[in-house]
Image: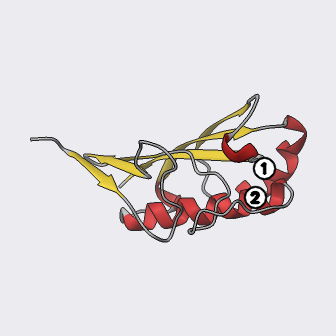
Amino acid sequence: MSNLQTISTKEAPAAIGPYAQAVKAGQWLFTSGQIPLTPDGQLVEGDARVQTTQVFANLKAVLAEAGASLSDVVKATVFVADLNDFTVVNEVYAQAFGDHRPARSTVQVARLPRDAKVEIEVIALV
C-alpha cells in the first residue's frame, strides 16, 4: 500500500499536464511548480510582481488543501524567465513568507510554461 496521497483543489489551476498539483508522502508535501494561472486556467497578464502574487495565491490554496501553510514550507525553488525580475519577485516572496525563512534556490530558465515570468515549487512539512 502506497503512502502517497494526491492533493487537488479547485482553488488553484488544474495541472496542465500529466502531474498532480501536489503529492503528500508521509509528513512531506511536494508541490508542483505553480505559474501565474487563475483557478480557471487563465494566465495573469502583467509584470513579475503581479504574476508572483498569483503564484503565491495558488501555492497557498494547494498547501491549505493538504492542511499546511507557507509557514510549513522548508524549501522553495523559484524559477524566473529573467533574473532582472529577481528584486521584484523577492519582494513579493518576502511579503508572502513574512518572518519565515525557508531554504531557497532561484534559477533563471530559458522559458516557462505559457511564457510565464515566474514559477515556484515548495516542499512543506505537514
Residue type at mark 2: give it: Gln
The part of the image, by quadrant, that contains residue 9 is: bottom left
| Crowd band around label 1 with a 10 angstrom C-alpha radius: few (<14), some (14–19), many (20+) | some
Query: Does the image show residue 97?
Result: no
- In this view, the residue farthest toward the top is 110
Q: Earlier in the sequence, mark 2 or mark 1?
A: 2
28 is higher (above) or lower (below) than 110: below
Q: Nearer the viewer, residue 45 or 30?
A: 45
Instruction: Judge from the rendering whether residue 26 lies leftward or rightward of residue 92; answer left or right.
Output: left
Residue found 31% across the figure and 52% down from its top: 6
Q: Which residue is mark 1?
A: 90
- In this view, the residue farthest toward the left is 1
Q: Nearer the viewer, residue 87 or 37?
A: 37
Q: Nearer the viewer, mark 2 or mark 1?
A: 2
The part of the image, by quadrant, that contains residue 45 is: bottom right
**Residue 50 x/y as whole percent:** 80, 63
**Residue 59 x/y as whole percent:** 55, 59
Instruction: Judge from the rendering whether residue 5 lies leftward or rightward of residue 44; answer left or right.
Output: left
Residue found 39% across the figure and 66% down from its top: 65
**Residue 34 x/y as whole percent:** 58, 51
Residue type at mark 1: give it: Asn
Q: Nearer the viewer, residue 75 or 60?
A: 60
Instruction: Judge from the rendering whether residue 6 lies leftward or rightward of residue 109; answer left or right.
Output: left
**Residue 100 x/y as whole percent:** 60, 56
- Check disc 2 and report its element: helix, strand or loop: helix
| Crowd band around label 2 with a 10 angstrom C-alpha radius: few (<14), some (14–19), many (20+) | many
Q: Which residue is mark 2?
A: 51
- Check disc 1 and report its element: helix, strand or loop: helix
